[in-house]
Amino acid sequence: MSVKLNSMPNDRLGSWIMNSSKTYELSRRKAGDSAEVAAEKARTSFETSFPEGSPALGHRVYDIVATETESAAEVVGFLWIAPLTEGSDAWWVFDIAVDEHHRGAGYGRAAMQLAEKAASENGAATLGLNVFGYNTVARGLYDSLGYETTAVQMRKTV
């Protein structure tokens, strides 16, 4: 098995933006945001990152493609990376997902390693990310790849 990143084709980008925005909103709610706050954060994030439905300068959205042979390639997920601010050497993984039925096969690990390479090739000195506290599988992956915790938010229902 090998994994590569291909730029997501424009004919799929619009539906990906809608789905990814909705997933982000739901994740924010699961992490404790109110429905209104989660919706506003998702709307603002995607309007800023994809003005008029196209990636802002520096933003890259990739298909994660697994290839068993040259003729057998399958999209198994997606990856979105970009500089934190225009021209910055601090880059960010804004979103990554491997399709549920492909999880556990090493595609996420390979995609993250390719993300590091792509960011570095585009001038990044660092690559950061956010992971919601409830996502223990992803947290384990990032720990194993050498990502360091830089902040922790905590909450208690009272």
Image (cartoon, grey):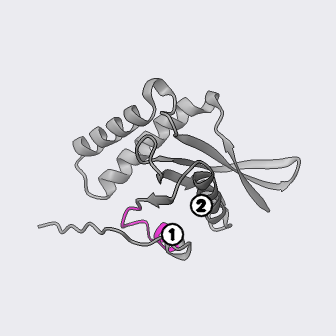
Above or below residue 51? Residue 22 is: below
Q: Earlier in the sequence, mark 1 or mark 2?
A: 2
Residue that appears at 66% across and 63% down = 110
Residue 3 spot, x, y in % from top left: 73, 57
Disc 1 + disc 2, Cβ < 8 Å: yes
Residue extending furthest toward the left: 158
The residue labelled by disc 2 is: 112
What type is the residue that disc 1 sits on?
Answer: Tyr
Residue that appears at 55% across and 54% down = 97
Question: Along the line of sight, which residue is nearer the eye, 123 or 29?
Answer: 123
Above or below residue 51? Residue 24 is: below
Residue 131 spot, x, y in % from top left: 41, 62
Question: Along the line of sight, which residue is nearer the eye, 89 or 52?
Answer: 89
Q: Is residue 24 left or right of residue 16?
A: left
Residue extending furthest toward the top: 52
Residue 19 on the magenta segment = no
Label 1 Cα crowd, 10 Å radius (few <14 / some 14-19 / many 20+): some
Residue 134 on the magenta segment = yes
Q: Is residue 98 left or right of residue 93?
A: right
Residue that appears at 40% across and 44% down = 85
Quadrant of the drawing holding the N terminus: bottom right
Quadrant of the drawing holding the C terminus: bottom left
Question: Which disc, if any, is residue 4?
Answer: none
What type is the residue that disc 2 sits on?
Answer: Met
Residues in magenta, as a range: 131-140
Quarter of the image where one finds residue 25: top left
Residue 5 spot, x, y in % from top left: 68, 49
Label 2 Cα crowd, 10 Å radius (few <14 / some 14-19 / many 20+): some
The residue labelled by disc 1 is: 142
